Image: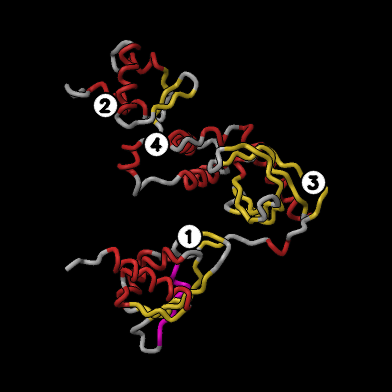
Amino acid sequence: MRLDKFGNELELLLLLTDNNNYTAQQLADMIHVTRRNLYYYLEYLHKSGFVVVKRGPYYRLDPSSRFFKKLHDNIIFTQEEAGYLRRILEASDKKDVKLTMLKTKLERYYGLEDMFTPSTLKRLHNNVRALKDAIEAKNVVTLKGYSSPHSKTVSDRIVEPFLLMNDDMDVRCYEIHSNMCKTFKLSRINSIEVMDVYWMNQDKHREVYTDIFMFSGDVKCPIRLRLGQLSYNLLLEEYPQSQSFLAPESNEKHWILDTDVVSYLGIGRFVLGLFQDIEILGDDSFKEYIAECVQKMGKTFLIDD
Protein backbone atom coordinates (compact mmCIF):
# COMPACT_ATOMS: atom_id res chain seq x y z
CA MET A 1 0.00 0.00 0.00
CA ARG A 2 1.52 3.33 -1.06
CA LEU A 3 1.65 6.16 1.44
CA ASP A 4 -0.08 9.33 0.28
CA LYS A 5 2.80 11.52 1.36
CA PHE A 6 6.34 10.76 0.18
CA GLY A 7 5.05 7.53 -1.36
CA ASN A 8 7.19 7.75 -4.50
CA GLU A 9 10.30 8.69 -2.54
CA LEU A 10 9.87 5.73 -0.17
CA GLU A 11 9.25 3.30 -3.00
CA LEU A 12 12.29 4.64 -4.83
CA LEU A 13 14.43 4.17 -1.69
CA LEU A 14 13.34 0.53 -1.49
CA LEU A 15 14.09 -0.07 -5.16
CA LEU A 16 17.54 1.53 -4.93
CA THR A 17 18.48 -0.74 -2.00
CA ASP A 18 16.94 -4.09 -2.98
CA ASN A 19 20.15 -5.57 -4.53
CA ASN A 20 18.85 -5.44 -8.11
CA ASN A 21 20.07 -3.40 -11.07
CA TYR A 22 17.56 -0.86 -12.41
CA THR A 23 17.89 1.66 -15.21
CA ALA A 24 16.29 5.10 -15.00
CA GLN A 25 13.43 3.99 -17.24
CA GLN A 26 12.78 0.87 -15.16
CA LEU A 27 12.70 2.91 -11.96
CA ALA A 28 10.35 5.43 -13.52
CA ASP A 29 8.02 2.68 -14.71
CA MET A 30 7.92 0.95 -11.33
CA ILE A 31 6.97 4.08 -9.40
CA HIS A 32 4.66 5.23 -12.23
CA VAL A 33 6.33 8.55 -13.12
CA THR A 34 8.07 9.98 -16.17
CA ARG A 35 11.85 9.81 -16.46
CA ARG A 36 11.92 13.58 -16.05
CA ASN A 37 10.08 13.34 -12.74
CA LEU A 38 12.33 10.46 -11.68
CA TYR A 39 15.36 12.72 -12.00
CA TYR A 40 13.62 15.24 -9.72
CA TYR A 41 13.16 12.47 -7.14
CA LEU A 42 16.83 11.45 -7.44
CA GLU A 43 17.87 15.07 -6.96
CA TYR A 44 15.60 15.29 -3.90
CA LEU A 45 17.27 12.23 -2.40
CA HIS A 46 20.68 13.77 -3.10
CA LYS A 47 19.75 17.01 -1.35
CA SER A 48 18.38 14.99 1.58
CA GLY A 49 21.76 13.44 2.27
CA PHE A 50 21.71 10.27 0.19
CA VAL A 51 24.56 9.54 -2.21
CA VAL A 52 23.05 8.43 -5.52
CA VAL A 53 25.51 6.34 -7.56
CA LYS A 54 25.21 5.60 -11.26
CA ARG A 55 27.21 2.62 -12.49
CA GLY A 56 26.79 2.30 -16.23
CA PRO A 57 23.02 2.64 -16.88
CA TYR A 58 22.10 1.47 -13.37
CA TYR A 59 21.33 3.45 -10.23
CA ARG A 60 21.75 2.62 -6.54
CA LEU A 61 22.34 4.33 -3.19
CA ASP A 62 25.82 4.39 -1.69
CA PRO A 63 25.91 2.86 1.83
CA SER A 64 28.09 5.75 3.01
CA SER A 65 25.08 8.07 2.74
CA ARG A 66 24.55 10.09 5.91
CA PHE A 67 21.19 8.53 6.82
CA PHE A 68 22.46 5.00 6.28
CA LYS A 69 25.40 5.68 8.56
CA LYS A 70 23.13 6.99 11.29
CA LEU A 71 20.91 3.91 11.06
CA HIS A 72 23.56 1.25 10.78
CA ASP A 73 26.81 2.40 12.43
CA ASN A 74 26.39 -0.10 15.26
CA ILE A 75 25.29 -3.13 13.24
CA ILE A 76 26.75 -3.17 9.74
CA PHE A 77 30.14 -4.58 8.77
CA THR A 78 33.02 -2.30 7.87
CA GLN A 79 34.07 -2.50 4.23
CA GLU A 80 37.16 -4.51 5.25
CA GLU A 81 34.98 -6.98 7.19
CA ALA A 82 32.59 -7.30 4.26
CA GLY A 83 35.50 -7.85 1.89
CA TYR A 84 36.90 -10.54 4.16
CA LEU A 85 33.56 -12.37 4.22
CA ARG A 86 33.28 -12.03 0.47
CA ARG A 87 36.71 -13.62 -0.01
CA ILE A 88 35.70 -16.55 2.20
CA LEU A 89 32.55 -17.05 0.14
CA GLU A 90 34.60 -16.98 -3.07
CA ALA A 91 36.15 -20.31 -2.06
CA SER A 92 32.76 -21.86 -1.27
CA ASP A 93 30.49 -23.94 -3.48
CA LYS A 94 29.80 -21.74 -6.50
CA LYS A 95 26.65 -23.73 -7.34
CA ASP A 96 24.90 -22.77 -4.10
CA VAL A 97 22.21 -20.24 -5.04
CA LYS A 98 22.04 -18.70 -1.54
CA LEU A 99 25.80 -18.20 -1.49
CA THR A 100 25.64 -16.50 -4.87
CA MET A 101 22.90 -14.17 -3.61
CA LEU A 102 24.88 -13.39 -0.47
CA LYS A 103 28.01 -12.59 -2.48
CA THR A 104 26.01 -10.27 -4.72
CA LYS A 105 24.43 -8.56 -1.72
CA LEU A 106 27.82 -7.95 -0.08
CA GLU A 107 29.26 -6.61 -3.32
CA ARG A 108 26.42 -4.21 -4.01
CA TYR A 109 25.84 -2.93 -0.49
CA TYR A 110 29.51 -2.39 0.35
CA GLY A 111 30.66 -1.29 -3.11
CA LEU A 112 32.87 -4.35 -3.67
CA GLU A 113 31.95 -5.03 -7.30
CA ASP A 114 35.29 -3.88 -8.69
CA MET A 115 37.22 -6.01 -6.19
CA PHE A 116 35.83 -9.33 -7.43
CA THR A 117 35.79 -9.07 -11.21
CA PRO A 118 37.84 -11.83 -12.94
CA SER A 119 40.49 -9.31 -14.01
CA THR A 120 40.84 -7.90 -10.48
CA LEU A 121 41.07 -11.36 -8.89
CA LYS A 122 43.73 -12.33 -11.45
CA ARG A 123 45.69 -9.14 -10.71
CA LEU A 124 45.53 -9.78 -6.96
CA HIS A 125 46.64 -13.38 -7.44
CA ASN A 126 49.61 -12.33 -9.57
CA ASN A 127 50.61 -9.62 -7.09
CA VAL A 128 50.43 -12.00 -4.12
CA ARG A 129 52.54 -14.56 -5.95
CA ALA A 130 55.14 -11.92 -6.90
CA LEU A 131 55.32 -10.61 -3.33
CA LYS A 132 55.70 -14.10 -1.85
CA ASP A 133 58.59 -14.78 -4.23
CA ALA A 134 60.19 -11.42 -3.42
CA ILE A 135 59.87 -11.94 0.35
CA GLU A 136 61.39 -15.42 0.11
CA ALA A 137 64.29 -14.14 -2.04
CA LYS A 138 64.57 -10.86 -0.03
CA ASN A 139 64.23 -8.74 -3.16
CA VAL A 140 63.28 -5.08 -3.42
CA VAL A 141 60.12 -4.49 -5.46
CA THR A 142 58.29 -1.57 -7.06
CA LEU A 143 54.61 -1.27 -6.28
CA LYS A 144 53.50 0.05 -9.65
CA GLY A 145 50.64 2.55 -9.73
CA TYR A 146 49.85 2.52 -6.02
CA SER A 147 46.71 4.57 -5.32
CA SER A 148 46.92 6.40 -1.98
CA PRO A 149 43.67 7.79 -0.54
CA HIS A 150 45.62 9.91 1.95
CA SER A 151 47.80 11.84 -0.49
CA LYS A 152 45.25 11.39 -3.32
CA THR A 153 48.04 10.35 -5.66
CA VAL A 154 48.90 7.38 -7.86
CA SER A 155 52.62 6.67 -7.84
CA ASP A 156 55.27 3.94 -7.87
CA ARG A 157 56.64 2.91 -4.46
CA ILE A 158 60.05 1.23 -4.10
CA VAL A 159 59.90 -1.01 -1.04
CA GLU A 160 61.32 -4.01 0.76
CA PRO A 161 58.29 -6.29 1.35
CA PHE A 162 58.68 -8.57 4.36
CA LEU A 163 55.21 -9.67 5.55
CA LEU A 164 51.85 -10.46 3.93
CA MET A 165 48.96 -9.77 6.31
CA ASN A 166 45.18 -10.03 6.66
CA ASP A 167 44.60 -13.03 4.43
CA ASP A 168 47.11 -11.72 1.85
CA MET A 169 45.21 -8.47 1.36
CA ASP A 170 47.88 -6.21 2.92
CA VAL A 171 51.66 -6.22 2.71
CA ARG A 172 54.03 -4.79 5.29
CA CYS A 173 57.04 -3.07 3.69
CA TYR A 174 59.99 -0.83 4.39
CA GLU A 175 59.63 2.11 2.00
CA ILE A 176 63.05 3.28 0.88
CA HIS A 177 62.06 6.86 -0.06
CA SER A 178 60.44 7.70 3.28
CA ASN A 179 62.69 5.45 5.43
CA MET A 180 59.55 4.13 7.14
CA CYS A 181 57.71 0.85 7.57
CA LYS A 182 54.25 1.05 6.03
CA THR A 183 51.31 -1.23 5.30
CA PHE A 184 50.07 -1.23 1.70
CA LYS A 185 46.76 -2.65 0.45
CA LEU A 186 47.10 -5.05 -2.46
CA SER A 187 43.80 -3.85 -3.94
CA ARG A 188 45.43 -0.46 -4.57
CA ILE A 189 48.50 -1.87 -6.37
CA ASN A 190 48.34 -2.06 -10.15
CA SER A 191 51.25 -4.48 -10.54
CA ILE A 192 54.46 -5.68 -8.87
CA GLU A 193 57.90 -5.30 -10.44
CA VAL A 194 60.54 -7.44 -8.73
CA MET A 195 63.95 -5.74 -8.90
CA ASP A 196 67.36 -7.41 -9.06
CA VAL A 197 68.28 -5.75 -5.78
CA TYR A 198 68.41 -7.36 -2.34
CA TRP A 199 67.17 -5.90 0.95
CA MET A 200 69.57 -3.40 2.53
CA ASN A 201 67.45 -2.33 5.51
CA GLN A 202 66.37 -5.58 7.15
CA ASP A 203 67.33 -4.25 10.60
CA LYS A 204 64.68 -1.54 10.15
CA HIS A 205 61.82 -3.92 9.31
CA ARG A 206 59.07 -3.60 11.93
CA GLU A 207 55.96 -5.77 12.02
CA VAL A 208 52.69 -4.04 12.84
CA TYR A 209 51.17 -4.84 16.23
CA THR A 210 47.51 -4.37 17.25
CA ASP A 211 46.90 -3.94 20.98
CA ILE A 212 43.83 -5.03 22.95
CA PHE A 213 42.30 -1.57 22.43
CA MET A 214 42.55 -2.01 18.62
CA PHE A 215 45.29 0.57 18.05
CA SER A 216 47.95 -0.52 15.55
CA GLY A 217 51.58 0.47 15.12
CA ASP A 218 55.14 -0.81 15.24
CA VAL A 219 56.18 0.64 18.62
CA LYS A 220 55.06 -1.14 21.80
CA CYS A 221 54.70 0.47 25.22
CA PRO A 222 54.53 -1.81 28.30
CA ILE A 223 51.58 -1.37 30.67
CA ARG A 224 51.01 -2.96 34.09
CA LEU A 225 47.82 -2.28 36.09
CA ARG A 226 46.15 -3.61 39.23
CA LEU A 227 42.41 -3.88 38.61
CA GLY A 228 39.53 -4.15 41.07
CA GLN A 229 36.41 -6.21 40.47
CA LEU A 230 34.58 -3.47 38.55
CA SER A 231 37.41 -2.54 36.19
CA TYR A 232 38.24 -6.22 35.67
CA ASN A 233 34.67 -7.04 34.64
CA LEU A 234 34.34 -4.01 32.35
CA LEU A 235 37.68 -4.68 30.67
CA LEU A 236 36.61 -8.23 29.78
CA GLU A 237 33.20 -7.05 28.58
CA GLU A 238 34.57 -4.27 26.36
CA TYR A 239 37.81 -5.97 25.28
CA PRO A 240 37.48 -9.79 25.50
CA GLN A 241 40.92 -10.23 23.93
CA SER A 242 42.45 -8.91 27.18
CA GLN A 243 41.72 -12.27 28.90
CA SER A 244 45.14 -13.74 28.07
CA PHE A 245 46.92 -10.73 29.61
CA LEU A 246 45.12 -10.89 32.98
CA ALA A 247 46.20 -12.83 36.07
CA PRO A 248 44.53 -12.92 39.52
CA GLU A 249 46.41 -11.86 42.60
CA SER A 250 46.64 -14.33 45.50
CA ASN A 251 43.66 -12.83 47.31
CA GLU A 252 41.58 -13.03 44.09
CA LYS A 253 40.16 -9.57 44.82
CA HIS A 254 42.44 -7.89 42.31
CA TRP A 255 43.79 -8.78 38.89
CA ILE A 256 47.02 -7.75 37.18
CA LEU A 257 46.89 -6.57 33.57
CA ASP A 258 50.31 -6.97 31.96
CA THR A 259 50.38 -6.09 28.26
CA ASP A 260 51.83 -3.84 25.55
CA VAL A 261 49.94 -1.01 23.87
CA VAL A 262 50.62 1.00 20.74
CA SER A 263 48.91 4.16 21.96
CA TYR A 264 48.05 5.51 25.40
CA LEU A 265 44.69 6.77 24.08
CA GLY A 266 42.75 3.54 24.51
CA ILE A 267 44.22 2.46 27.84
CA GLY A 268 44.19 6.08 29.06
CA ARG A 269 40.45 6.43 28.43
CA PHE A 270 39.84 3.21 30.36
CA VAL A 271 41.99 4.19 33.35
CA LEU A 272 40.64 7.75 33.60
CA GLY A 273 37.08 6.47 33.55
CA LEU A 274 37.73 3.99 36.38
CA PHE A 275 40.60 5.64 38.26
CA GLN A 276 39.17 4.76 41.68
CA ASP A 277 39.33 1.06 40.86
CA ILE A 278 42.71 0.96 39.10
CA GLU A 279 46.31 1.29 40.31
CA ILE A 280 49.04 2.00 37.75
CA LEU A 281 52.04 -0.24 38.47
CA GLY A 282 53.97 0.71 35.34
CA ASP A 283 55.43 2.13 33.42
CA ASP A 284 56.56 5.65 34.38
CA SER A 285 55.79 7.09 30.95
CA PHE A 286 52.16 6.03 31.25
CA LYS A 287 51.95 7.49 34.76
CA GLU A 288 53.22 10.81 33.37
CA TYR A 289 50.68 10.63 30.55
CA ILE A 290 47.79 10.13 32.98
CA ALA A 291 49.09 12.94 35.24
CA GLU A 292 49.17 15.31 32.25
CA CYS A 293 45.62 14.31 31.27
CA VAL A 294 44.37 14.97 34.80
CA GLN A 295 46.10 18.36 34.83
CA LYS A 296 44.55 19.34 31.49
CA MET A 297 41.14 18.18 32.64
CA GLY A 298 41.50 20.30 35.77
CA LYS A 299 42.20 23.39 33.69
CA THR A 300 39.42 22.63 31.23
CA PHE A 301 36.74 22.11 33.84
CA LEU A 302 37.97 24.66 36.39
CA ILE A 303 35.04 26.48 38.00
CA ASP A 304 35.65 30.15 38.71
CA ASP A 305 34.71 31.49 42.15
Q: Amino acid at mark 4?
A: Pro
User: Closer to the camera, 82 or 44?
Assistant: 44
Q: Earlier in the sequence, mark 3 or mark 1?
A: 3
What's the CA distance linking mark 2 and mark 1?
Answer: 40 Å
- The residue identified by callout 2 is 10
Instruction: Kindly identify the residue that appears in the image at 31 percent across and 17 percent down.
Output: 40
What's the CA distance linking mark 4 and mark 3?
Answer: 40 Å
Residues shaded magenta: 242-249
Residue 247 inside the magenta-drawn segment: yes
Q: Describe residue 123's horizontal placement relative to residue 136 as left or right.
A: left
Q: Earlier in the sequence, mark 4 or mark 3?
A: 4
Q: Quadrant of the C terminus?
A: bottom left
What's the CA distance linking mark 3 and mark 1?
Answer: 33 Å
Q: Quadrant of the N terminus?
A: top left
Looking at the image, do the residues carrying marks 3 and 1 touch, with CB atoms under 8 Å apart? no
Image color mode = secondary structure
Q: Secondary structure at mark 2?
A: helix
What's the CA distance linking mark 2 and mark 3?
Answer: 56 Å
Please state the horizontal and vertical placement of residue 204, each as a whole percent of the image. Answer: 69, 62
Q: Secondary structure at mark 4?
A: loop
User: Closer to the camera, 193 or 291?
Assistant: 291
- Give the answer, above or below, for where 54 lies relative to 264: above
Looking at the image, is mark 1 or mark 4 nearer the viewer? 1
- The residue identified by callout 4 is 63
Whether residue 276 can be seen here: yes
- The residue identified by callout 1 is 215
- The residue identified by callout 3 is 195
Q: Amino acid at mark 2?
A: Leu
Q: Describe residue 234's horizontal placement relative to residue 243 as left or right.
A: left
Q: Earlier in the sequence, mark 4 or mark 2?
A: 2
Q: Describe residue 219's horizontal placement relative to residue 145 as left or right.
A: left
